[in-house]
Amino acid sequence: MYSFKMSNIDFYFSIGSTYTYLTVTRILNVEKKHGVKFNWKPFSVRAIMKEMNNIPFPKDKKNKVDYMWRDIERRAEGYGFFAKTPVPYPLTEFDLANRLAILGMKEGWGIDYVRLTYKRWFQEGKEPATEPNISEICAELKIDKDSVISKANEDDIGKEYESNTNSARDHKIFGSPSFIVGSEIFWGDDRMEDAITWSKKNG
């Protein structure tokens, strides 16, 4: 008798990456459909992109920026949900948003927090980790806002955030979302299924 081994795929992401909205909105359905497990790893794509002098939405390239916003809307519609762009960008509380994600992954509410944060950002235009949005999200998740913000700013969360970012560097990750299967990188929402196929073929 053959035993089934579920594929595990590392999912590196930053709240603040626009295309990651598409991934976090559909990832649970994809996980269930394909019988895989994604390991959520919040990291600072901002730090890595600064090191590369990479500006994702350059103000002097309006046609490109307009295309990217419209592309997200089209692809969301193709997946069966929607996006209303442009949204507030870049985030003023980028690091806090991702530190909260790390804390949440440890405490069991992280995935719900990330998905809800992205939903409110791209469907209601509410910027992550800012008021009144953060209070409303915490209320919906039934977690104490002041407590989780305090814990998210503690050294151990900061160290894990830095560790995830260093791990992303080691894997030569340059953007979010990225999927790691062994030594292979799959970058972008449209490569999630490719990562799954590779994982099942080479796992």
Image (cartoon, rainbow, N blue to C red):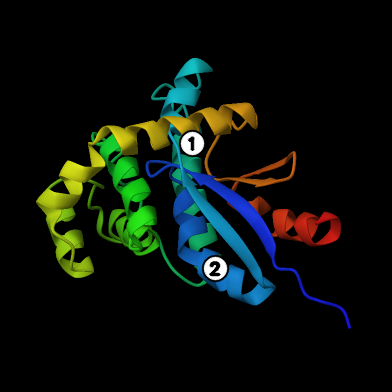
Q: Please tell me which residue is depicted at 60% across the width and 50% down the height of the picture.
A: 10
Q: Is residue 200 left or right of residue 66?
A: right
Q: Residues within 10 Å of mark 1 (few under 14, many from 20)?
A: some
Quarter occupied by the N terminus: bottom right
For marks 1 and 2 on the same chain, the one whose residue lies earlier in the sequence: 2
The reply to whether discs 1 and 2 touch (Cβ–Cβ < 8 Å) is no
Nearest the camera: 57 or 9? 9
Q: Left or right: where does residue 141 sit relative to residue 113?
A: left
* In the rendered image, the vertical position of residue 118 relative to residue 128, given as above or below: below
Q: Position of residue 32 (x, y in %)?
A: 60, 75
- Residue 73: horizontal and vertical position, in percent? 46, 56
**Distance (Cα) linking label 1 and label 2:** 29 Å
Total numbered circles? 2
Residue 164's mark? 1
> Mark on residue 79?
2
Q: Position of residue 19 (x, y in %)?
A: 49, 48
Q: Amino acid at mark 2?
A: Tyr
Q: Which residue appears at 48% of the width and 49% of the height?
A: 20
